[in-house]
Image (cartoon, rainbow, N blue to C red):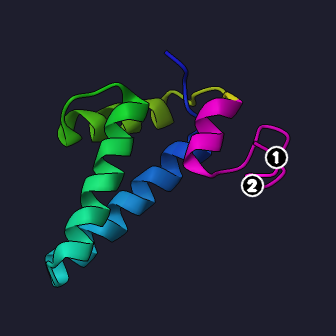
Amino acid sequence: MITPSPSAVRALLARYAVARFAHEQCPDDRTVLALEDVTYTLCVVTACRTVAEALAAADALLEKGAAPGVGAVDHALGTRCPDRTPWSPAHG
């Protein structure tokens, strides 16, 4: 399994928190889609089947200080590349 960088995991956890908060405050089609999207991505990146498992796996990755990311995972998440340049479709 490709291990995501800590910054990619943190970015996903932040997106999840924002999407969940927005959905709890004012549930509508937009918030449902945003929450489903980030939940799916979090599950794929952590190789888990449920959001509870994915959140636990993300926490575990951050606790053990996962090695800086492999470019493919960072590119897919739109976070920084290992060389610290911002990712863009032109660089992908």
For label 1, the SS is loop
Q: Is residue 91 left or right of residue 59?
A: right
Instruction: Find the distance from the CA under tag 1 to the CA under tag 2.
Output: 5 Å
Q: Is residue 16 left or right of residue 26?
A: right
**Amino acid type of disc 1?**
His
Going 22% across and 42% down the picture, which residue do you hit? Answer: 51
Going 14% across and 78% down the picture, which residue do you hit? Answer: 27
Residue 13 x/y as whole percent: 41, 53
Crowding at mark 2 (Cα within 10 Å: few <14, some 14-19, many 20+): few
Q: Which residue is mark 1?
A: 91
Decide: is 14 above or below 74: below
Q: Quadrant of residue 26?
A: bottom left
Residue furthest toward the bottom? 26
Query: Which numbered marker is on residue 88?
Result: 2
Q: Principal SS element in the magenta part?
A: loop
Query: Which numbered marker is on residue 73?
Result: none
Decide: is 65 above or below 28: above
Residue 77 x/y as whole percent: 56, 47
- Visible residue check, residue 68: no
Magenta region: 71-92
Q: Is residue 63 left or right of residue 79?
A: left
Q: Answer yes or no: do the residues labelled 1 and 2 have beta carbons within 8 Å?
A: yes
For label 2, the SS is loop
